Image (cartoon, coloured by chain):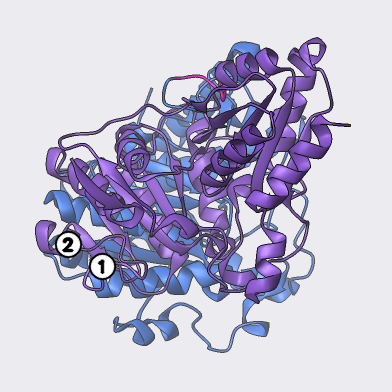
Chain colours: A blue, B purple
Amino acid sequence: MTSTHAAPELSYLDHKVAMYRCQVALRQFEQRAYDLFLENFVKGTSHLSIGQEAIAAGVAAAMRPTDWTFATYRGHAHTLARGVPMTPIFAELMGRTNGLMAGKGGSMHLTSVEHGMMGSYAIIGAHLPIACGAAWSAQYRGTDQVAVAFFGDGSVNIGAFHEALNFAAVWKLPVIFFCENNLWMEYTRTSDVTAVANPAADRAAAYGLESIIVDGNDADAVYEVTSLAIARARAGEGPSMIEAKTYRHGGHSRADPGKYRPDEELAEWLLKDPIPLYRSRLLEMGVSEDDLLVLEADVDAEVETATNEAKAGGVPGEDLLLKDVWADGGASWRN
Amino acid sequence: MAQLTFREAIARGIAQEMRRDDSVVFLGEDVGAAGGVFKGTVGLLEEFGDVRVRDTPISEQAILGAAMGAAMTGLRPIAEIMFSDFFAVCWDIVANEIAKSRYMTNGQVTFPLVIRSGNGGGLRFGAQHSQSVENWAMMIPGLKVVVPSNAVDVIGLMAASIRDPDPVIFLEAKALYASKMDVPDGEIVDTLGSAKVLRQGSNATVVALGSMVPKALQAAEELATNGIECTVIDVRSLVPLDTTTILREVSATGRMFTVEENPRLCGWGAELASIIADEVFYDLDGPIVRITTPHIPLPAADALEDLAIPSVERIVNTIHKSMNS
């Protein structure tokens, strides 16, 4: 299975090509996930990252394999970007035994501890204090691991956000709080319900942190600002909060066509689509059109193979139903 | 052998485990320099230092979130929620995150953590600092729930909870903090999911938890003078639940009375009553009777609080009346 994870030892240009491949893979994966919904292979809900790929790709490229990602329910892209293959993710969305969690978690809870993907959390803001705990563990054990917690602009008005920021600041924890500001809190414009213009960055000062804003549709910019924040965290200089400006091309979730957004706003952001922008940049840097076409065809094939492998997975049965409530593998609450 | 209070036993239990395992860390509000608002953690900061014993801001979600994140990455944290009523402000972390994540991830993560909390009434603190919330925790799949009733059990069950690979809600009856008993020297380690038969009698089985245990014992002594001999069981652990011991002892006497501090609806005794009715119904000689706090927020006035929480007198009268009807 091809990995979409960018290894840090790559050459300058190879590194950028890898970040491009990652973005293309995230886009193709999400488009296929949407198609599988329409075909009723995927039940329930899902929240796609189409339009926001530069963030997942740029941040993951700045992380080491031993670092930890804590994502939201909009977590397919972050899971893929940490190197989790497509097949178990598609299979998880389809509720199959070859799913990443054998179908027990679903789209909103993708987790792969072996890849440092420490979970996708579907209660707004909850994972921010949890990421603090992982960072505390690294600090206590004297490793230089860093935790990165992604969250949306809608998360900045919930209590856990503020508790986590203060907690991380006073304990100088190696954690990066990364806001993917896509301007819309579910169906409501974030600026209509938030007292400051930059929902995360304008709050940074309240916790003694630097205000950092980055173009979330530029993977290089995301990579650079994240690398700096991670370096500070590894050096024991404490947490950072980064606010990336971006846009989701679709609605909040599967059920939402996103019609509340003005056409001109969507049109404006489609012009800022991170993937064609990055592709042009690579061509300017001397990567050949042919090489990119091969790369894109390779991702297409990966998506196709993974889709078929996922569909071939079994339907989970009763053996999984009562498994792993407890560490002993069972669900017994009495003798 | 030394005489220890319940509150001193808490610090001793934690210290015992922190000495043997460097991955055990402890965090909470006022737990370090102040030694805990109930003085249950005096001396821990001095012995283990401020890297392992950490005072936190008033941020219950951050405290429990940090404990969860630390537990899933190699530590064995103990977190304190000062009053169990405060679980209401961080219940998402308990009920949605800690309790569900192992199952949702198909066993990829474990949460060896303990959340200790002062629980229940008797201190005239009023409704927001007095509720007995063991039934809140018991109804969440994925949480173990431990409620000791004396100093020796505090140490042994604390050790067992810290060593357990699953999340444990450890509820300390505030009304018992000042109670004393002789405690053996040396390491004490108990077993989760084991109820204790404290007294054997042939007429009725009284099942009690936490602060209700000494009251149930005292009631049994009084009932004995009236010719009613009771078995008294200290449940000690709601999850896992030692149904083997309870079923056996209820079958032996043919009667079960529960004594519960929680407000009535969905108290742990209701679950026990259901199990008894399902599994040993034909061994019963009379109705199962639950003696509980009424379904009310707890009042502050001493006279009212004493009316609300089951008293020795109420336990005696209820059992006496039921056994003679």
Q: Is residue A60 visible?
A: no
Chain of the residue on which disc 2 is drawn: B
Quadrant in the picture for the N terminus of chain A: top left
The segment highlighted magenta reads A329-335
Secondary structure of the residue carrying numbered label 1 = loop
Q: Observer-nearest residue: A283 or A162?
A: A162
Q: For this view, does B287 lie left or right of residue B224?
A: right
Q: Observer-nearest residue: B88 or A113?
A: B88
Q: Observer-nearest residue: B252 or B155?
A: B252
Give the quadrant of residue A90: top right
Q: Which residue is mark 1?
A: B35
Q: Amino acid at mark 1?
A: Gly
Residue at 77 percent of width and 27 percent of height: B274
Residue at 62 percent of width and 83 percent of height: A191
Report the disc number at residue B43.
Answer: 2
Q: For this view, does B248 lie left or right of residue A188?
A: left
Name the spot of residue A221 as percent of width and height, x first: 32, 67
Q: Amino acid at mark 2?
A: Gly
Q: Observer-nearest residue: A116 or A23?
A: A116
Q: Same chain for marks 2 and 1?
A: yes
